[in-house]
Amino acid sequence: MSNPEPLFSARAQQEEIGARYLRTRARSAQLAAPLSEEDCGAQSMPDASPVKWHLAHTTWFFETFLLKRYEPDFRPFHAAFEALFNSYYNSIGEQFPRPRRGLLTRPGLAEIHAYRRDADQRMQRLLERRGEDAELRALAMLGIHHEQQHQELILTDVKHLLSMNPLQPAYGAPPAAFSSAADPLRWLDCAGGVVEIGHGGSAFCFDNELPRHKHYLQPYRLASRLTTNGEYLEFIAAGGYRDPAHWLSEGWDWVRAQQISAPLYWRDGGDGWHEFTLGGLAPLDPRRPVVHLSYFEADAYAHWRQARLPTEAEWERAAVTCRLDGNFADDNLFHPLPARGRGLAQMFGDVWEWTQSSYAPYPGFRPATGALGEYNGKFMVNQYVLRGGSCATPRDHIRATYRNFFPASARWQFSGIRLARDAA
């Protein structure tokens, strides 16, 4: 979390954060609204969580880190919720095992919504009474961005859950059809040299985006757009999943052990490839970006194309020259769109872009003190960095310095490929 903004605008910031808090909380409820109570309580795999749990955990965050700290005569909504909806904060106390969250048939969805309403009323009173406190505002903003992360997880976890159902149920409207051809891929030259990487200024960021520091880059080239389904089909047709020459050793072991032969939600039913989307099963559109790939698959494809994945510093240096615009969750499409426009396209939105960078602390990184120090720093091992956001990311949640991270085998997130090469 960055330093709070200057105090002279404290009243305006107080009003803005109160409004943003309510918008964010309402958006979470809106995302859950199309789902049945059964949908909200089910868990499809250990890495995913029930929607009901996401709604409760984000409320737990505000109750634990703000209401408990600032509210006079604090009393929890329910004493058992401290352990039930604690995710991984060991300094707070016990946690209910993550792989068993789908067994929590109680509390019911109605009680979770009551929990949220109670916390919202108390948070509104707290922000009205103490909202000029810079530290409180900083914690509230962290809670808002934390909830936006879980809004994205609601969508990715629901997609995985619905994909397991033989009925192939839809969460929302099916993806729209396109008639125009995909923009051709071009290679764009990017200058090297000493650059500054990491968040600067006083606006919100997570602690893993700090500190801003110097980094040396060799000249490099970036693909003008994301890799498409059609291009990835060429890799499959060429036997890419059967040839160990393209794969990292661990990736090849993973492919064979898991018997993987296509991206996560692709279906080959004999009448051509289809793709499961949040709008149900749809014919695979060769012009859209390929999505739901692991780091192993992204790296193997890049190797096959005689290219590589960008480093996160290369990606960030290019992204700061681009307009922060794209296909985000706010558009309610929840599926990647074909590239449009010249120059560097699709740097933000559509799919998270794998980089070849391991998730590690920046030089001089210092985690926050107390339980909030567990937010990012303790995960800086055995993960890779993704950049740019996706069609499931809220637009005002992303920025060029944002560092997402997942293990190399993760596929249920909206993750895809932008290729890079060394300069000729």
Image: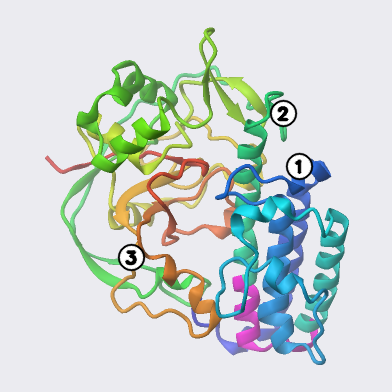
Which residue is at 83% across, 81% downward?
A: 125
The answer to whether residue 87 shows anywhere in this view is yes
In the displayed structure image, the side of residue 133 where residue 368 appears, left or right: left
- First in sequence, mark 3 or 2: give its number: 2
Q: Amino acid at mark 2?
A: Pro
Which residue is at 71% across, 61% downward?
A: 24
In the picture, the quarter occupied by the C terminus is top left
User: x, y percentage for residue 208?
Assistant: 42, 69
Q: Amino acid at mark 1?
A: Asp
With respect to residue 171, does 319 lie above or below? below
The answer to whether residue 224 shows anywhere in this view is no
From mark 1 to mark 3, how far is it between C-alphas?
36 Å
- First in sequence, mark 1 or 3: give its number: 1
Q: Which residue is mark 2?
A: 169
Name which quarter of the figure residue 255 lies in.
Answer: top left
The magenta segment = 128-142
Crowding at dot 2, Cα within 10 Å, few <14 / some 14-19 / many 20+, comes out as some
Front residue of 229/316: it is: 229
Q: Is 57 within the magenta?
A: no
Say which mark, if any, is on residue 360.
Answer: 3
User: x, y percentage for residue 81?
Assistant: 75, 70
From mark 3 to mark 2, how far is it between C-alphas?
39 Å
Q: Which residue is mark 1?
A: 39
With respect to residue 414, does 138 lie above or below? below
Q: Amino acid at mark 3?
A: Ala
In the displayed structure image, the side of residue 291 where residue 58 appears, left or right: right
Query: What element does badge 3 sit on?
Result: loop
